[in-house]
Amino acid sequence: MPSVEIIAVGTELLLGQLVDTNTAYIAQRLAEAGIDVYGSAAIGDNRGRIAQAVRGALSRADGAIMTGGLGPTVDDLTRDGVCAALELDTELYAPALEQMEKTFTALGRPMRANNRKQAELPCGSTPLDNPNGTAPGFIAFARDGKFVACMPGVPREMKPMMTEKVLPFVRERLGSGNGIYTRVLHTIAIGESEIDHRIADLFRSCENPKIAVLAHDFRADVKIMAKAPSRERAEAMIAPLQAELERRLEGYVFGCDRGTPASAIHHLLQERKSMLAVAESFTGGRIAAALTSVAGSSESFAGGVVAYANSAKIALLGVASATLERAGAVSEEAAREMAAGARTRFGAELALATTGIAGPGGGSQEKPVGLGWLALDDARSGVLVRRLSLAGDRETIASRATTIALGMLWQHLALSP
């Protein structure tokens, strides 16, 4: 099956000084066009290593797509590495030189001699004009007909060159007429291993469409990918597999594609015409921030209190001082009273409360770092409480508790009569 490899050039990528977003963008565009990506790599600014990467890519795939290393400085070596790999000399591309001269004149700056090398391209290559910058791209060819498409590393220059020039070339050369279309099922309150247990046979038996499980943000998504000549055909292929996945994961799939836990919660609250309030301690306002990120959230979210100090829990949420003295702020009793206080203060039908120890200090043998309590007070059905025991640093514990709390709330709303 025809495929390409993606190579990002730049020592700054290897040092972690710059995040490579170009590879993701290129891969997404290729997927939409139905072009398979064999692999990807990041290479430093070294002529020999670039040449080696190009030779390796062309030994495995039908072409390579590269970004970066086309500038005027001494460490911009992509052109030289490609020429070494393909055993090509360079030649001047006059239109690129003229464009550079006009650009520098318009800027009122002198064009240095080193800029000229940007217009020197591998012999026999197809130039790719760059109206958004000074460095042209190019598509060079090996003796066996395989290609290397090179683009600038600056995203605002690379993206239009990719979509307007490189992608049409690759689609015509390698495309099958199919695109790759996806549907992402979002789950919550279920682990990746449990998902795998429930759908393992589908992994083995499904080829087109096929599935993948992606864990992130303390949740897991199930991605369905179909290769088809049109979105309509892909949707028809995806539908039965999606239905089967939702059946096996019933009670855990809160939405698909662009859906979020907060948007799903907002929808369910609107359906039951209820308002929600929150009382947060160790989640530090993260739950309220998530819920209010949804457009129209004022129709389902009444408000919240971030109460860290015991005095705030007493004054703002009505938690009894006797409760805090007897059981402590990190306790089931305190969580219950925080939720009740929030529901009363905001006049809401439901309230969600969190209290715990995010660390790194503050823990004890009896109440270690990572201990937490969630309480959901529902005027219709009473109070639901959950004890947490989480691992990680402070941010990890707070973020994971937020996801668990949102999952608890969504499941309660989705499964309640």
Image: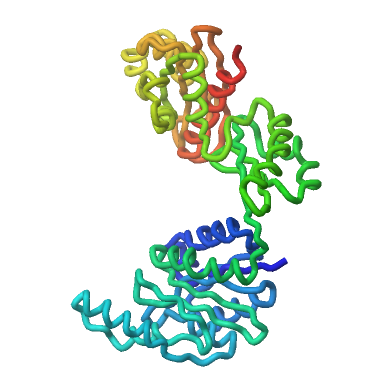
Q: Residue at x 33, y 15 (%)?
A: 316
In the rendered image, the quadrant that contains the C terminus is top right
Residue furthest toward the left?
108
Q: How is the image coloured?
A: rainbow
- Residue 247 left/right relative to 67: right
Report the number of numbered marks.
0
In the rendered image, the quadrant that contains the N terminus is bottom right
Q: Quadrant of residue 200?
A: top right
Q: Residue at x 18, y 77 (%)?
A: 108
| Residue 169 image point, x, y percent | 56, 71
- Residue 197 left/right relative to 381: right
In this view, 146 is above or below 299? below
State whether residue 100 appears in this view: yes
In this view, 55 is above or below 340? below
| Residue 378 image point, x, y percent | 50, 11
In this view, 207 is above or below 273? below
Q: Quadrant of residue 58?
A: bottom right
State whether residue 10 appears in this view: no
In this view, 209 is above or below 76? above
| Residue 311 image point, x, y percent | 32, 17
Report the front residue among 195 and 333: 195
| Residue 182 image point, x, y percent | 62, 47
